[in-house]
Amino acid sequence: MSPHIKISGCVFLNISLHLKIKWPENFYMLMISLKELKRKRRIVSHIGKGEVVVCWDGKNVFAFSGFCPHQGGPLAKGRLKDNLLFCPWHGCCFDLGKGICVDTGSCRNVRKEDVVLHRFKCVVTDGMVCVDEA
Ligand code: FES
C-alpha cells in the first residue's frame, strides 16, 4: 500500500519520504523561563540519568552537572555566593564562569586541576534560558 495522507477529504501523496529532514540548529536539551529562574535562583532538571543545575547569580546564568567532580556530591544543594559554588560534602569551591576549582575545601590529596566542573552552554533568547552541551 502506498503512503497517503488524507486532509479534508482530499488525498495527497506523502512526499516526506523524499525529503531530507534537517535537525534544527536551535535544538536544546533544556529550556526554562528566565523569569522563573530569576525568581527561584536555582532550577534542577533531570536529563536521562544526569542532573543539570541552572542558576542565576544576579547577573549571569550558569548550567552545570549536579554531581561534584570530586566524589559526586549534590551540587544542587551547594551554597552559591556570587559566581562561586561550594560543594556541600567536602567544600570544594568552583568558579561557575570558568568551571575551575578555586579551593579544594577539606579534600585531602586533591589537586584543583583534577576536579573540573562539568558545565553546559547557556544561551538566553526571548526570555528563555536554553541549555545545551558545551
Ligand atoms: S564531593 Fe564535592 S567536594 Fe567532595
Image: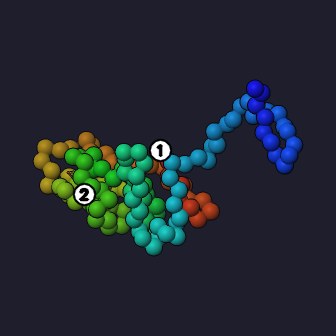
Question: Residue lying furthest top in this view?
Answer: 1
Camera-side residue of 107 and 126: 126
Question: Residue lying furthest left in this view?
Answer: 108
Question: Residue lying furthest right in this view?
Answer: 10
In percent of width and height, residue 58 lies at 44, 70
Camera-side residue of 122 and 13: 13
**In this picture, residue 88 sits left or right of residue 60:** left
In percent of width and height, residue 133 lies at 47, 44
Of pointers 1 and 2, the one earlier in the residue sequence: 2
CB atoms at circles 1 and 2 under 8 Å apart?
Answer: no
Going 52% across and 70% down the picture, which residue do you hit? 35
**In this picture, residue 125 sits left or right of residue 133:** right
Going 13% across and 43% down the picture, which residue do you hit? 109
Real-space Cα distance between discs 1 and 2? 22 Å
Residue labelled with disc 1: 133
In percent of width and height, residue 91 lies at 20, 58
**The N terminus is located in which quarter?**
top right
Amino acid type, residue under disc 1 in the picture: Glu
Crowd around label 2: few <14 · some 14–19 · many ≥20 (10 Å): many
Going 51% across and 60% down the picture, which residue do you hit? 32
Amino acid type, residue under disc 2 in the picture: Cys
Question: Does residue 97 show up?
Answer: no
Residue labelled with disc 2: 87
**In this picture, residue 64 sits left or right of residue 92:** right
Going 59% across and 46% down the picture, which residue do you hit? 27
Crowd around label 1: few <14 · some 14–19 · many ≥20 (10 Å): few
